Image (cartoon, rainbow, N blue to C red):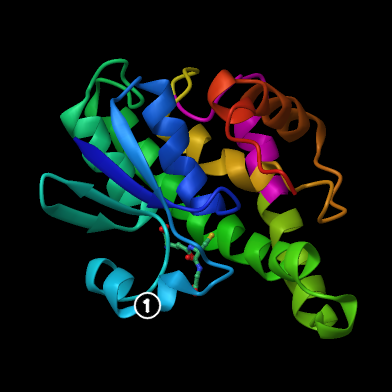
Amino acid sequence: MITIHHHPDSTFARRVTMALIEKDIPHQKVLVDMAAREHRSPAYRALNPYGRVPTLVDDGFVLSESTAILDYLEACFPAPALVPADVQGRALVAMHMKLCDLQMARQTGIIIFPKRFLPPARWNKDAMALAKGEIEDHLAILETQLAGRSYLVADAYSLADLCYTPFLQFLALMEITPPPAVAAWAARLLERPSARQTAPAR
Ligand SMILES: N[C@@H](CCC(=O)N[C@@H](CS)C(=O)NCC(=O)O)C(=O)O
């Protein structure tokens, strides 16, 4: 049985819970009480030395990093497929997953962590403005790649789209107006049952 250590406010853990729903994978969830700093406890660090969620445990096999977990789930539960069948399609999905982390996920965290969890007096406004500009530059690139398409790769929903979904959720909170193809894509992704069922409370 797969166990996923998670927190419902975590964007990265949400990727994994979405994949579990998309693939209808039997699993159990363990809530890591981040407010109580349980993610920093020796017991949790024994699973994930970096003290981050998500972490997957599968019959004693322990795996962290959301994209690695998504790849593992895809390999263990290939249907319904969330990657294309062809080698080049899979390579493109891997590229987009990496670019999501490099160009959007990190920057989104810089903006939304303070906005969700800290009083304005503790916001680093310069870092947040820089991150916002980087996201806007990245969305302009995605806009050209998404023109005339519904999804990033092979015009089918894939792990590439799934990886972006938790971060696209917060465009409004980040006060980012996405260009039209990105806006339509974000709306399409956020309408999926896996996204609706995992939408964060704040
Ligand atoms: N690269 C990691 C990032 C995971 C991550 O940063 N998770 C956040 C919650 S969204 C966390 O656990 N933060 C706690 C901390 O860094 O202390 C992944 O893809 O799983």
Q: Nearer the viewer, residue 141 or 42?
A: 42
* Residue 22 relative to residue 25: left or right: right
Name the residue at 79% across, 82% down. Answer: 124
Q: Quadrant of residue 93?
A: top left
Name the residue at 81% across, 84% down. Answer: 122
Name the residue at 39% across, 55% down. Answer: 54
Name the residue at 30% across, 79% down. Answer: 42
Q: Is residue 182 above or below residue 12?
A: above
Q: Which residue is mark 1?
A: 41
Q: Is residue 151 magenta?
A: yes
- In percent of width and height, residue 131 lies at 72, 69
Secondary structure at numbered mark 1: loop
Q: Is residue 95 above or below residue 174?
A: above
Queried on whether the Cβ of the residue with tag 1 lies below 8 angstroms from ligand 1, the answer reads no
**Residue type beneath disc 1:** Ser
Count of numbered labels shown in the rendering:
1
Q: Nearer the viewer, residue 76 or 149?
A: 76
- In percent of width and height, residue 121 lies at 89, 84
Q: Is residue 158 magenta?
A: no
Q: Which residues are magenta?
A: 139-153
